[in-house]
């Protein structure tokens, strides 16, 4: 009997050993796409060829063509947090549950925000570049004390909460903007977005990419930021209008930017590279040895739960999981199958 297949479209880590161990123990075969995310049409072709019961994707686009190509598809999971690379509507129309792993990297991403702010406030990257170029001029330092900075955190999910906690530990005043103010504010100042931008020396973005947040930080909103401030984007590149950001840097309205995500990634606009106070990392804020282990294990376990018809921990579209009889029998009957 052929075992049901799980297609892993791509992965941002060296191998698929963790995923294979969990999925194969549950009676599933793993089909792997290329490590780098392939175009959407290639993912659809893989789906037509292999007919997986579940698709797990890191960065690759899982669009309607891929979903429609598999009549027996029973689950689509994001090996990550954001869902902008999955056609959630197409899945929901088919009754296919969509999952993610929202709780695996909030410490890493908030650490990354703090690291970028520290690098800017202490001139770490800029001075390293100058020293490597043969310059030794401590008199050129124009540095900032973290405890005198006001930090605006936009978005207050798990990552935003950890970010606020860590900046407060450095003595910074922290402002927060979020759609829904929690009952327990922990003494934080929750303010309107315009007020946050006008008062903050550092603005940290922790937002999903949706139609409402696409270019949320456009020319007008960036112009409303405090002069000489730093913009940190660790969410999705499309939240910030890249050209508007470049223009603000060119004018000197912004003193710098810390970017782990870009609209055009992996291509980096040359205009960003010429700014000494812009620090760019290649979409790695989520990554550490611990976070990747958690992501991969939890993502595989959620696929297994979905295919067994068990309650989901990370359901994203309110769709109950269900399985076909053959897939269910194969998964449940496997000796030593992982029980999540």
Image: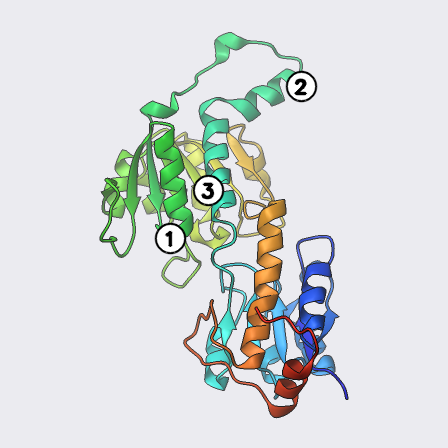
Please rate how many residues cluster around mark 1, counting C-alpha atoms within 10 Å: few if below 14, some from 14 to 19, many from 20: some
Q: Percent x, y for residue 177?
A: 29, 47
Mark with earlier residue (2, 1): 2
Depth check, front residue: 133 or 334: 334
Depth check, front residue: 177 or 306: 306
Depth check, front residue: 213 or 80: 80
Asked if marks 3 and 2 touch (Cβ < 8 Å), the reply is no
Where disc 3 sits, the SS reads helix
Up the image or down, 103 lies above or below 132; here it is below
Up the image or down, 295 lies above or below 176; here it is below
Q: Percent x, y for residue 329?
A: 64, 87
Up the image or down, 209 lies above or below 226; here it is below
User: Residue 132 got which mark?
Assistant: 2
Residue drawn at x 51%, y 39% as measured from the top left: 112
Residue drawn at x 50%, y 85% as measured from the top left: 94
User: Comparing marks 3 and 2, which lies closer to the viewer?
Assistant: 3
Q: Percent x, y for residue 321?
A: 50, 81
Where disc 1 sits, the SS reads loop
Task: Specify whether residue 63 is in view.
Answer: no
Q: CA distance from mark 3 to mark 1?
A: 11 Å
Task: Specify whether residue 101 is in view.
Answer: yes
Q: Which residue is mark 3?
A: 110
Q: Which residue is mark 1?
A: 157
Q: Percent x, y for residue 72?
A: 62, 87
Q: CA distance from mark 2 to mark 1?
A: 39 Å
């Amino acid at each position: 009997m052929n075992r049901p297949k799980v297609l892993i479209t791509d992965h941002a880590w060296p191998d698929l050993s963790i995923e294979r161990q969990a999925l194969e123990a549950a009676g599933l075969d793993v089909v792997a796409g290329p490590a780098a995310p392939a175009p959407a049409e290639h993912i659809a072709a893989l789906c037509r060829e292999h007919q997986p019961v579940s698709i797990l994707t890191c960065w690759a686009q899982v669009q309607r063509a891929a979903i429609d190509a598999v009549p027996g598809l029973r689950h689509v999971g994001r090996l990550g947090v954001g869902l902008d690379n999955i056609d959630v509507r197409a899945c929901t129309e088919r009754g296919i549950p969509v999952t993610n792993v929202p709780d695996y990297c909030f410490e890493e991403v908030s650490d990354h925000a703090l690291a970028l702010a520290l690098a800017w406030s202490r001139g770490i990257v800029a001075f390293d570049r100058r020293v490597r170029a043969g310059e030794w001029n401590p008199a050129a330092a124009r540095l900032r004390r973290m405890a005198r900075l006001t930090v605006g955190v936009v978005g207050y999910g798990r990552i935003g909460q950890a970010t606020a906690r860590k900046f407060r530990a450095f003595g910074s005043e922290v402002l927060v903007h979020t759609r829904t103010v929690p009952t327990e504010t922990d003494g934080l100042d929750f303010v309107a977005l315009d007020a946050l931008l006008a008062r903050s020396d550092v603005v940290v973005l922790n937002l999903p990419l949706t139609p409402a947040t696409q270019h949320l930080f456009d020319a007008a909103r960036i112009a409303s930021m405090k002069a000489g401030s730093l913009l940190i984007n660790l969410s999705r590149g499309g939240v910030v209008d890249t050209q508007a950001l470049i223009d603000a840097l060119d004018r000197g309205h912004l003193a710098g930017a810390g970017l782990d995500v870009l609209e055009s990634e992996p291509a980096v606009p040359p205009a960003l590279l010429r700014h000494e106070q812009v620090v760019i990392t290649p979409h790695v804020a989520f990554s550490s040895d611990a976070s990747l282990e958690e992501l991969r294990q939890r993502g595989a376990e959620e696929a297994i739960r979905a295919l067994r018809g068990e309650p989901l921990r990370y359901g994203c579209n309110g769709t109950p999981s269900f399985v076909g009889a053959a897939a269910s029998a194969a998964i449940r009957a496997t000796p030593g199958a992982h029980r999540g």
